[in-house]
Image (cartoon, helix red, strand yellow):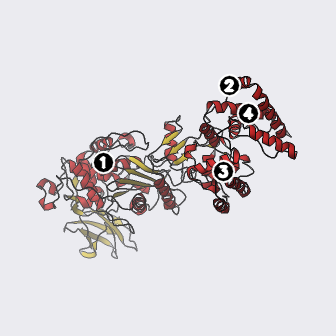
Amino acid sequence: MIRARWLFAAALVLWTGAFARDRVDEWIDATVLPSLVPQTSVQVLDRDGALLRAYTVADGRWRLPLSTVETDPGFVAMLLAYEDRRFRDHPGVDARAMLRALAQAVWNGQVVSGGSTLTMQTARLLEESGTGALSGKLRQMRVALALERRLTKDQILDLYLQLAPYGGNVEGLRAASLAYFGKEPRRLTPAESALLVALPQSPEARRPDRHPAAAARDRVLARAVGAGVLTADAGAVARSEPVPTQRRPVPALAPHLADRARAEQPGALTHRLTIDRGLQVALEKLAADSVAAMGERMQIAIVVADHANGEILASVGSAAFTADQRQGFVDMTRALRSPGSTLKPLVYGLAFDEGLAHPETLIEDRPTRFGTYAPQNFDRQYRGTIRVREALQMSLNIPVVALTEALGPARLLAALDRARVGYAIPLDDPGLAISLGGLGVSLQDMVQLYAAIARGGTALPLRWRMEGNAPPGARVLSDIAAWQVGDILAGLPPPPGAPENRLAYKTGTSYGHRDAWAIGFDGRHVVGVWMGRADGTPVPGAFGADVAAPVLFQAFARVTPKLEPQPPAPPATLLVANAQLPAPLQRFRPRGAAFAVEDAPKLTFPPEGAVLEPLAAGLKVRVEGGIAPFSWLVDGLPAVTGLGQREAMLPLTTRGFVTLSVIDAAGRSARSTIRIR
C-alpha cells in the first residue's frame, strides 16, 4: 500500500512538474544536499598500489574508496541492466519507469516493480533514509534531481559503489568484493558481478555467508542475458559457479608497519609503502611456520630491504598480530635487543680501515684478561694462533675484544652513529663488551647497518614510505674494508640442508640465549631475522646458527630465486697470503694495548695446599691459560693425556699428600700439592 501511494504521488509530482517547470527548478536548486564525500576507510597500500591493510570508519563499517574506472566494466553494465537501464539518460527520476510501475500496480492490485533509480538509491544511501515512507521517497526524488545537476553520472555511480550495503558492516563494492571473493573489483567474473549486483537489494537476507544467494544471483544473470550484457552461454557458465559461503577477512598485512604509518600521519586516508605485497605474504607465513613448534612464547621478526636504494620490501613484526602469549602486538623489528655477535663484522671492518689487521693477519685466541674483564669464547675453547678471517667466521670472542680494545669502544659507537643505528647502553658506560652484544639495538637498524656494508661501506637510511628519496648517508667503512668483511662472511658454511650459494651472513646469540640473530646479504638484498621471546626471558638452547640461520636462508629463497653476485674486489684491495703482507700486518699487535696474555698454564683448582675429602668419582681439576691439549699427571705419573677441555676428573685412590701437574701443548707446566684425607 505504501509503495503504491508513493508511486502515485511521484507520478503526480511529475505531472504537475511538467506544467510548473520554473517552480520545480527553483525547488530542486534550493535542495540542501548531504555531504557528497562519504567517510572511507584509511587504506595502506604496497609499492604497486595493492591493498595491505584497511581500517574501519568511525562507526565500525568497512567502506573503501572506489571509482568506476577501478571497477570491472562488466559489473557496471550488469548493474545498469538490472537496476536502471536509462541511468545515462534520465535526470535522476525516471518518469517512464514510475508510470510503468504505477500502471502495473493498478493492473495487478499490488506493486510489481519499483521506479527507484540508481540516483535515488544513492540519495537514500547518502542520507541513510528509509525506503517505504512517502515523505522519504519524495525527499529521495528531490535529492536525486539535485544530485544530477551537481555531479556527473560517473560521480553518482562512484558514490553508489562506495555506499551500497552488502550485509553486516560491509559497505561498498570494494569491501564486498574483498569480503566475499578475496579480490579487488577490477576483475570480477560475471557470476561474482551478478551476486554483488543482487546483494544491496536485500543485504541481510541474501548474505552468502548466512543464507543461500544463488537465486538472487541467477535473476540478475537472466536479466543481463536478456539485456544483451551476457550471451546465453556466458550466463549458463556463470550460473554453474558456486556461491561463496564464507566471508573473508579484510587484508591486514604488515600490520605493525601499517599502524606506524597511520600514527605518523593520522590525517592521511591513503598510505603508500615500499612493501612488496607478495613477499610480505610469503614471509608472514614463513614466520608463523618457523615458530609453530617452538612453544607458545617463541617470537620472530623479519626485515627485508633493497640495499641499493634503502627500500624495505617486507617487515614482519611478529608471528601473528594477536594478543597471545607471544605478545604479537609488539613490533619486534623495532624493539631494542642485544645483538650478540652480529656487531663483530663492523669491528673487523673498522680494524681493517685502521691498519690494525687484514683478513690474513694472525691473531691470538687465548685466555686473556683486559684489565678486570676476562671474556671467554662461547664454547669455552681456545684456538691459539689463527687468521683474522677464521676468527670472524668462527665468531671467536677474544680476538674481537682485542680489536675493540685497540680501536676504542668510542670508535665503534661513532661508526654506529654514522650508520644511523640507534642504540642503548646499560648505565651509559660503553665498555669492551659492546662488541659482544653489550648494548641494545633493533632488528631494523641492524639490517640498515648490514645494508651499509653491502653497499660498499656507505650508509643509506632504510625507508618504508614510497614518497621521497633519502640521500646517501656518511661512510661507515671504506669500500675495501666493506668488501673484505663481505668476502669473509660469504665463506661461512650454510646451515644443514641450505644451498651452497655464498650468502654473506652472520649469526649471533645474546647472553643467556635471549636473542637469536641471523643477518645476511647478497649483491642486492639484505635480510635480518630475530628470534626470541618478546618479554626477554631466556630460550634455553636457542642459538642464532641453529634457529635463525635456517630461517634466513628460507627467507632469501622467497626474496629471489637466485642470489645476486657480490661485487668484485675494489682495485686497491690487497689480495695476498699472510707471508706476503707487510710486516706490521702479518701479526696483530694492538696499539698501546694494556693487557697481558697469560701464556703459561695455571692450575686454578685445586689450589696449592688445599685439603680435600676423597670422592668416589675422583678429583675435579681445572687449568687456565696455556694451549690445549693438556696432559695431567698425579705424582709424576700420567693420569689423563691429550685432553682438549680445561676441566678433567682425575682418578685418585691414594691418601695423603699428592702432587698434581698439568702440561700444555707448548710443554709449559703448572703444579700444586694438595692433601687427601
Which numbered disc flags the more N-terminal residue, 4 or 2? 2
The answer to whether 277 appears left or right of 450 in the picture is right
The answer to whether 505 appears left or right of 153 in the picture is left
Q: Which mark is nearer the camera, 4 or 3?
A: 4
Q: In this rendering, is residue 403 above or below 503?
A: above
Residue nearest the viewer, comparing 419 with 60:
60
How far apart are the two marked residues, 4 and 3, measured between alpha carbons?
A: 25 Å
Secondary structure of residue under mark 1: helix
How far apart are the two marked residues, 1 and 3, measured between alpha carbons?
A: 66 Å
- Residue 379 shows in the view: yes
Which numbered disc flags the more N-terminal residue, 1 or 4? 4
Q: Which residue is mark 3?
A: 196
Q: Which mark is nearer the camera, 2 or 1?
A: 2
Q: What kind of residue is marked 4?
A: Met
Tell whether label 2 touches label 3 (CB within 8 Å): no
Which numbered disc flags the more N-terminal residue, 4 or 3? 4
Residue 63: give x, y in percent of width and height.
Answer: 62, 42
Residue nearest the viewer, comparing 361 with 71:
71
Q: What kind of residue is marked 3?
A: Leu
Q: In this rendering, is residue 527 above or below 114?
A: below
Which numbered disc flags the more N-terminal residue, 3 or 2? 2
Q: Which residue is mark 1?
A: 432
Residue 397's image quarter? bottom left
Q: Which residue is mark 4?
A: 141
Which numbered disc flags the more N-terminal residue, 1 or 3? 3
Secondary structure of residue under mark 2: helix
Residue 322: give x, y in percent of width and height.
Answer: 57, 51
Residue 3's image quarter? top right
How far apart are the two marked residues, 1 and 4, measured between alpha carbons?
A: 79 Å
